[in-house]
Image (cartoon, rainbow, N blue to C red):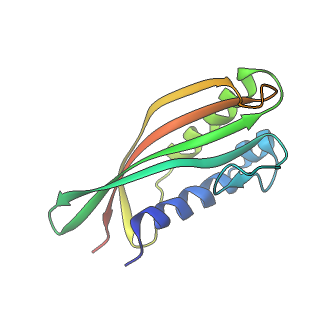
Amino acid sequence: MSDPAFALQAAIHARLDGDAALTALVGAGRIHDGPPRAAALPFVAFGRWRVRPLDAVGGVAHEHRLELVVRSAAGGRREASAIAERAVAALGEAGLAPDGHRVVSLALIERTSGEGRDRRSFEAVAVLRVVTEPVA
């Protein structure tokens, strides 16, 4: 069985990379494993990811709390927030299928936005809670 975090990350990456509406907002190939240092803006990247096991009948479920980080140079918070909103919507539109696992629930915990560290860009962060369990 595959690691639940990596399986979920691959499924999320594939979903976001294949979403035409998100690609229209950020451009092709702008979904990253982590915030790249010199990438063109805007982009979506995975931020912090925490995983904890949950007891479940028939196996071990996992709770994932992950961040999707959006960086943008245009439009203030508006563009970054719109991209984050679309990314979250894309994940909720159809069931994710992580290899060897099933998504039991997916929820947006919070979304924040603000000025980037460089003081020239803007950042929006969507924090998600996802529960997975192994497929029998």
Quadrant of image for the N terminus: bottom left
Picture coordinates of residue 129, whole percent (x, y):
40, 43
Q: Position of residue 3 (x, y in %)?
A: 41, 71
Number of dots carrying numbers: 0
Give residue 44's quadrant in the image. Answer: top right
Q: Residue at x 72, y 22 (%)?
A: 78
- Camera sees residue 93: no
Task: Tell me what residue is drawn at x 57 percent, y 47 percent.
Answer: 47
Q: Is residue 47 visible?
A: yes
Q: Position of residue 93 (x, y in %)?
A: 53, 45
Question: Which residue occupies 44% across, 62% down?
Answer: 5
* Camera-side residue of 21 and 125: 125
Q: Which quarter shows the C terminus?
A: bottom left
Residue 62 horizontal side relative to residue 110, left or right:
left
In the image, residue 132 above or below residue 76: below
Residue most toward the left? Answer: 57
